[in-house]
Amino acid sequence: NRSSGKQGYAIAAALERCGAEVTLVSGPTALPAPAGVTRVQVGTADEMLAACHSALPVQVAIMTAAVADWRPAEAAPEKLKDKATRTAIELVANPDILAELSEAGPDRPKLVIGFAAETENLVDHARAKLTKKGCDWIVANDVGGTGVMGGDANTVTVLDAGGEDAWPTLSKDEVAERLVERIAVTLG
Ligand code: CTP
């Protein structure tokens, strides 16, 4: 799905500034790679999953990508010429990368952090995602209004097994700094 990548890139840069060794697995975006970060560029969910597995073992995995839920079942090698009669395209489900990394067995990162963009019932939906995907934290944001997608500010609530932490509206850089601080404290 379309995504500016701004929040993920801000987190990669903040982690690097704090001394972490960072692999940034990125879908298509016009953003430059942050200094000191190893960027792996991918074009599909399958490629993203493979790149994430190749990056293991890691202490922390932070999953900000807006992965499409489905992809076309077949990629046509040539232009489709049946547009007068074709009214549907068959879709198949993409892998859930966050859920797979959350069950990566002995290679599972100590901390797996997902994001959740919701348009209503933010906390309930985000908590359901935390359980369903088996990750440790969910950073949830309400994208019901305008301005978050592609913008520079973000209002998030961080959920874990212990409760919820509603942060004020911050720049995406500040959200990244604060998240990195929370990670550093948690990992001691
Ligand atoms: N995610 C993922 N792989 C997918 C879909 C989502 O890794 N195929 C990750 C996202 O990077 C994010 C989290 O799962 O960290 C939640 O993504 P979201 O799109 O909000 O959730 P979905 O599972 O697609 O749920 P829904 O569309 O029902 O809200």
Image (cartoon, rainbow, N blue to C red):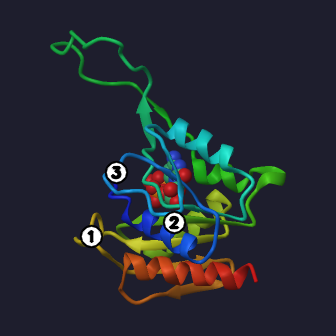
**Residue at label 3?**
29
Q: Where residue 81 appears, x then y in whole percent?
A: 21, 9
**At 52% across and 84% down in the image, what residue appears?**
178
Distance from disc 2 to disc 3, alpha carbons, whole Å, reads 14 Å
> In the image, 9: left or right of 102?
left
> In the image, 142: left or right of 64?
left
Q: Nearer the viewer, residue 122 or 153?
A: 153
- Is tag 1's residue or tag 2's residue first in the polypeptide sequence? 2
Which quarter of the image is occupied by the C terminus? Answer: bottom right
Select label 1 or label 2 by which is in front.
2
Among the 4 quarters of the image, the one containing residue 145 = bottom left
Quick one: label 2, few (<14), some, or many (20+) residues within 10 Å? many
- Residue at the bottom extreme? 168
- In the drawing, what numbered circle is on residue 59? none
> In the image, 132: left or right of 56?
left
- Asked if ligand 1 lies within 8 A of label 3, the reply is no
**Residue at label 2?**
12
In the image, residue 130 above or below residue 156: above
Name the secondary structure under disc 3. Answer: loop
Select label 1 or label 3 by which is in front.
3
**At 63% across and 57% down in the image, what residue appears?**
133
- Amino acid marked by disc 3: Thr
In the image, residue 173 above or below residue 168: above
**At 50% across and 81% down in the image, what residue appears?**
177
- Is tag 2's residue or tag 3's residue first in the polypeptide sequence? 2
- Amino acid marked by disc 2: Ala
Q: Where residue 33 appears, x then y in whole percent?
A: 43, 57
**Residue at label 1?**
151
**At 54% across and 43% down in the image, what residue appears?**
48
Number of numbered discs overlaid on the protein picture? 3
